[in-house]
Image: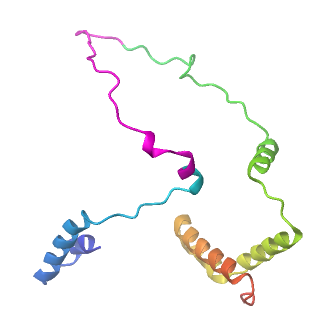
Amino acid sequence: MYAFLSQIITFKDPDLEKLYVFAKYLGRYLPVDGPVLPVEVQQAIDMDSYKIQRVAQGKISLSRGDGVVAPASGQGPRGSTVEEMEALSRIIKELNERFGTDFTEEDRVFIRQLEERLANDRALLASMRGNPPENARLTFDHVVTDRFRAGLKDPAPE
């Protein structure tokens, strides 16, 4: 943030600039907590068995001179093709078979109540109206997390 602000505002504190430079170089040596892969991805990949290995080495020889590149045709593997579309109901059915859960009536009631409370949450609605989608999504995630933690025990928003 300092790098950005120092382009706009003239800071007159040399110690602040020194601290920024020191922290910038120090940051390169500190461990970074990157995004954690989902558990199923971590279990499916065995990174201990991978290694970098050169499998071939060579040169590509190209002839000098004027060449002609033929325009791409609509035929062949790179041409435009009509993709077969599956019915949405079939895709949903397949996803439900793979990942679906048998919800109890209690679960359904909980989800309906959660939907109603989210639909009536003024802060969430204001965030969705006044922010770009990615910022509104952050607010949505925060509100939903709070609602799940509270277990819908708090009173409905006004």
Front residue of 131/136: it is: 136
Does residue 131 lie above or below 49 as drawn?
Answer: below
Q: Position of residue 31 (x, y in %)?
A: 32, 64
Count of labels in the image: 0
Q: Position of residue 27 (x, y in %)?
A: 25, 67
Which color scheme is applied? Answer: rainbow
Residue range in magenta is 42-68
In the image, is residue 43 part of the stretch drawn in magenta? yes
In the image, is residue 155 part of the stretch drawn in magenta? no
> Image check: 83 left or right of 79?
right
Q: Residue at x 21, y 68 (%)?
A: 26
Q: Is residue 58 visible?
A: yes
Q: Residue at x 74, y 90 (%)?
A: 155
- The answer to which quarter of the image holds residue 32 is bottom left
In the picture, the quarter occupied by the N terminus is bottom left
Q: Main secondary structure of the magenta part?
A: loop
Q: Residue at x 48, y 19 (%)?
A: 72
Q: Position of residue 89 (x, y in %)?
A: 82, 45
Q: Residue at x 56, y 17 (%)?
A: 76
Does residue 43 lie above or below 145 as drawn?
Answer: above
In the picture, the quarter occupied by the C terminus is bottom right
Q: Residue furthest left?
A: 14
Q: Position of residue 38 (x, y in %)?
A: 56, 56
Q: Residue furthest front?
A: 48
Q: Is residue 128 visible?
A: no
Front residue of 42/141: it is: 42
Front residue of 83/143: it is: 143
